[in-house]
Image (cartoon, rainbow, N blue to C red):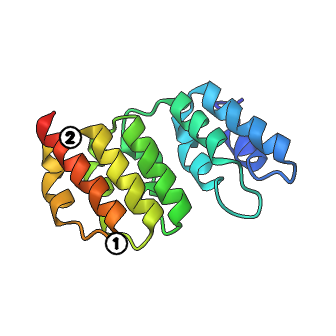
Amino acid sequence: MAHLAPRSLERMLADKNVGVRSLAAQIAGLSGASTMVPALLHSVEGTREIPARIISMAVLRTAPTSISAFGGTITDSNDRVRALAIDLAGQLNLVDARRSIEAGLESDSSAVRAASIRALQRLGSPLSLPALEKMSAHNPQERLFVQAVIHDIRVG
């Protein structure tokens, strides 16, 4: 159904019934339709949201191999959408998302910054060291987390 009628499935993601929305997300994930990733990620916010755990599993199951499948969600103006997109890009090891993830380090949102730090830790690229070193942490815990990630990347 996801491949034959993607618009129908997208409408189901906004259904008034949470069970229908959750089932639509699961179907999208099981279908492997990476074209559904932006719609899935946007379903984490709004009045008819789908729990982030269901969206995460669906996106991970579609297994996109490039950040292009995420559309603009990795730079979305909604912090919940952006943080989830960044986190999933890291889990999927989408190295082509590195610069967008690094940009999240400068976000005003603590959720986006934390997702960016975790994603860069997962990617483990030494190319991200300058961005991590220049990040201005907003609190002592964040500073310690960044320092630990820098150490992990340097040591390997």
Report the residue at 35% width, 46% height from top: 119
Q: Amino acid at mark 2?
A: Asp
Q: Residues within 10 Å of mark 2 (few under 14, many from 20)?
A: some
Q: Nearer the viewer, residue 130 or 137?
A: 137
Report the residue at 32% width, 54% height from top: 101
User: Is the residue under label 1 in contact with that under label 2 (CB below 8 Å)?
Assistant: no
In this view, which residue lies farthest toward the right? Answer: 17
In this orientation, does residue 75 appear?
no
- Image spot of residue 27 (x, y percent): 70, 30
In this orientation, does residue 93 appear?
yes
**As drawn, is 118 to the left or to the right of 153?**
right
Q: Which mark is residue 10?
A: none
Please identify the quarter of the rendering in which residue 21 is found. Answer: top right
Q: Amino acid at mark 1?
A: His
- Image spot of residue 18 (x, y percent): 83, 47
Residue annotated with mark 1: 138
Q: Secondary structure at mark 2?
A: helix
Residue annotated with mark 2: 152
Placement of the C terminus among the 4 image quadrants: top left
Q: Secondary structure at mark 1?
A: loop
Q: Nearer the viewer, residue 34 or 103?
A: 103
**As drawn, is 19 to the left or to the right of 62?**
right
State which tag comes first along the sequence, 2 or 1. 1
Q: Residues within 10 Å of mark 1 (few under 14, many from 20)?
A: few
Q: Nearer the viewer, residue 81 or 1?
A: 81
- Image spot of residue 43 (x, y percent): 66, 53
Report the residue at 72% width, 41% height from top: 9
Report the residue at 44% width, 57% height from top: 72
Placement of the N terminus among the 4 image quadrants: top right
